[in-house]
Image (cartoon, helix red, strand yellow):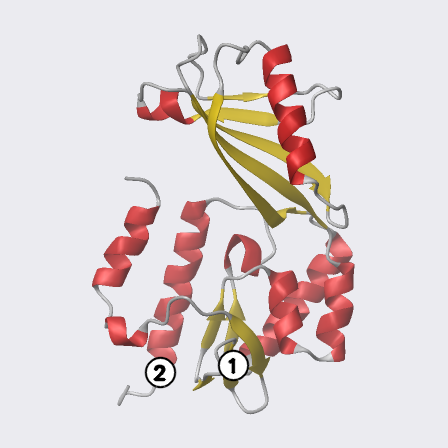
């Protein structure tokens, strides 16, 4: 049932009263070890583990050095369309890369072929620089035109449903100088019991499996460091 199965298993093993859904972390007070959420809640912490994108997490810290590091981070944004059509196409691939500068998307995938369903359902990925504005309606029109041009759809297969997601950030850019600054920042934060990990929290390029291993290793470290009465 997809990667969400991992979350379901973890959630069932937790005390649901200690899980806060539908709120956003807005500020972290490092000195006083307090986390604030957008609903006005204030949470005291011994350890804080962040997996949100590092550029957003640095905003939450709010100090001048964090803001300066954020400005140095390089990445791109990706607009993702999920599209549903009236009937199947003649394509049997799971996904395709499209290295054509005259086509707005660089990759498309076929959910219906992966899941063996009876109508064409797709994802489409379109890349932008980190500062670019994204015109979603314009890109949807371009996407449909280019899908016709590539022979994926034709006028007899109308679009029934669409959903757009802007991943910001999507792919981080690894820079040796910035990477050294990130490592130094992580070491400083760890001294206050704050850890920022994962593909986006750690500002790296890795797989889900890598993230699971990193999280497991950190959990074991914190468990071993915790006072015996916890």
Choose top left, top right, bottom left or bottom right for residue 27. Answer: bottom right
Spot occupied by residue 149 in the image (x, y as percentages of width and height): 64, 11
Label drawn at residue 127: none
Q: Are marks 2 and 1 in contact (CB under 8 Å)?
A: no
* Residue 105 visible in image: no
Quadrant location, the C terminus = bottom left
Choose top left, top right, bottom left or bottom right for residue 23. Answer: bottom left
Q: Is residue 168 above or below residue 222?
A: above
Residue at image x 69%, y 33%?
138
Measured in 3D between alpha carbons, the distance from the residue under mark 2 to the one under mark 1, in whole angstroms, is 23 Å
Residue at image x 33%, y 71%?
19
Classify mark 1: residues with Cα within 10 Å, few (<14), some (14-19) or many (20+).
some
* Residue 47 visible in image: yes
Choose top left, top right, bottom left or bottom right for residue 64. Answer: bottom right
**Secondary structure under the numbered disc 1 in the rendered image:** strand
Judged left or right of residue 162, residue 185 is right
Spot occupied by residue 108 in the image (x, y as percentages of width and height): 54, 25
Spot occupied by residue 14 in the image (x, y as percentages of width and height): 24, 68
Judged left or right of residue 51, residue 63 is right
Spot occupied by residue 79 in the image (x, y as percentages of width and height): 61, 39
Q: Earlier in the sequence, mark 2 or mark 1?
A: 1
**Secondary structure under the numbered disc 2 in the rendered image:** loop
Classify mark 2: residues with Cα within 10 Å, few (<14), some (14-19) or many (20+).
few
Q: How many marks?
A: 2
- Residue 137 vs residue 175, the one in the foreground: 137
Q: Which residue is mark 2?
A: 226
Residue at image x 26%, y 76%?
17
Q: Which residue is mark 1?
A: 36
């Amino acid at each position: 049932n997809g990667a969400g199965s991992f979350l379901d298993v973890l959630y069932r093993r937790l005390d649901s009263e200690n899980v806060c859904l539908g709120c956003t972390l807005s500020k972290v007070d490092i000195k006083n070890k307090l986390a604030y959420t957008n609903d006005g809640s204030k949470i005291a912490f011994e350890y804080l583990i962040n997996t949100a994108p590092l550029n957003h997490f640095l905003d939450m810290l709010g100090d001048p050095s964090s803001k300066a590091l954020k400005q140095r981070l390089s990445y791109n944004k990706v607009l993702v369309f999920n599209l549903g059509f009236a009937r199947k196409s003649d394509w049997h691939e799971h996904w395709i890369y499209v290295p054509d500068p005259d086509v707005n998307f660089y990759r498309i995938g076929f959910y219906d072929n992966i899941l063996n369903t009876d109508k064409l359902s797709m994802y489409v990925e379109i890349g932008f620089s980190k500062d670019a504005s994204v015109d979603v309606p314009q890109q949807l029109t371009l996407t449909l035109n280019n899908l016709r041009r590539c022979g994926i759809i034709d006028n007899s297969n109308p679009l029934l449903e669409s959903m757009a997601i802007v991943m910001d950030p999507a792919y981080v850019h690894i820079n040796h100088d910035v990477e050294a600054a990130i490592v130094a920042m992580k070491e400083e934060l760890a001294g206050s019991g704050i850890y920022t990990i994962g593909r986006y929290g750690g500002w790296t390029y890795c797989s889900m499996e890598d993230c699971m291993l990193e999280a497991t290793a950190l959990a074991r470290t914190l468990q071993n460091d915790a006072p015996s009465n916890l």
